[in-house]
Amino acid sequence: MKNKTTKIGGSPIEQHIGRRLRQQRLERGLTFEDLDTLIGGRKGNIKAFEEGRRFVGPSDLYALSAALGVDVSFFFIGAGKRVYKATPLARSPEVVEGAEQLIQAYYKIQDHRLRRNVIELLKDLADEESVDDT
């Protein structure tokens, strides 16, 4: 049987699933180890999933959705064609620093509805900008 570990970074869909997983894990205040235990997985699986270094199979997705209280489809929301869009600035130090600041500020917001609204606002702004660029 083939090893399920992918190269570091993984495919765009694995990266997307990893980002969605990390979002939910942090929102629920869980550590990597907490979630590994909840799904009955090996130590280090969650970190590898989040980094896109390990393939998240159907049984893992099912266990993760149950442990996090989300539908399996949650992990694919927003993937679509956007997963394959080139993001040349994604690795620049300025973008990474800005993203870290954004995430820190986001987690300081206590009201879950307000957090959801912030995300929707950012998505709308990004969509408007991508339309303007064309």
Image: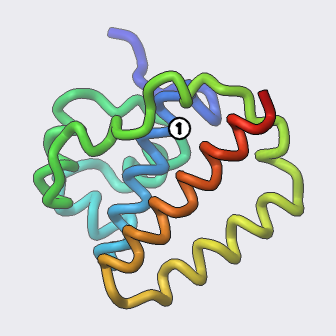
Q: Report which residue position mark 1 lands on.
A: 15
Q: Residue at the top extreme? A: 1
Q: Position of residue 27 (x, y in %)?
A: 35, 73
Examine the rendered structure and indicate whether residue 115 appears above or below residue 89: below
Tell me the SS state at disc 1. helix
Q: Quadrant of residue 11?
A: top right
Examine the rendered structure and indicate whether residue 17 appears above or below residue 111: above
Residue at 64 percent across and 49 percent down: it is 126
Q: Amino acid at mark 1?
A: Gln
Number of numbered discs on residues: 1
Q: Which part of the image, by quadrant, shows the N terminus? A: top left
Examine the rendered structure and indicate whether residue 85 appears above or below residue 73: above
Q: Position of residue 133 (x, y in %)?
A: 80, 34
Nearer to the camera, 4 or 25 = 25
Nearer to the camera, 1 or 66 = 66
Q: Position of residue 117 (x, y in %)?
A: 41, 70
Residue at 73 percent across and 28 percent down: it is 86
Q: Which part of the image, by quadrant, shows the C terminus? A: top right
**Callout 1 environment at 10 Å: few (<14), some (14 to 19), or many (20+)?**
many
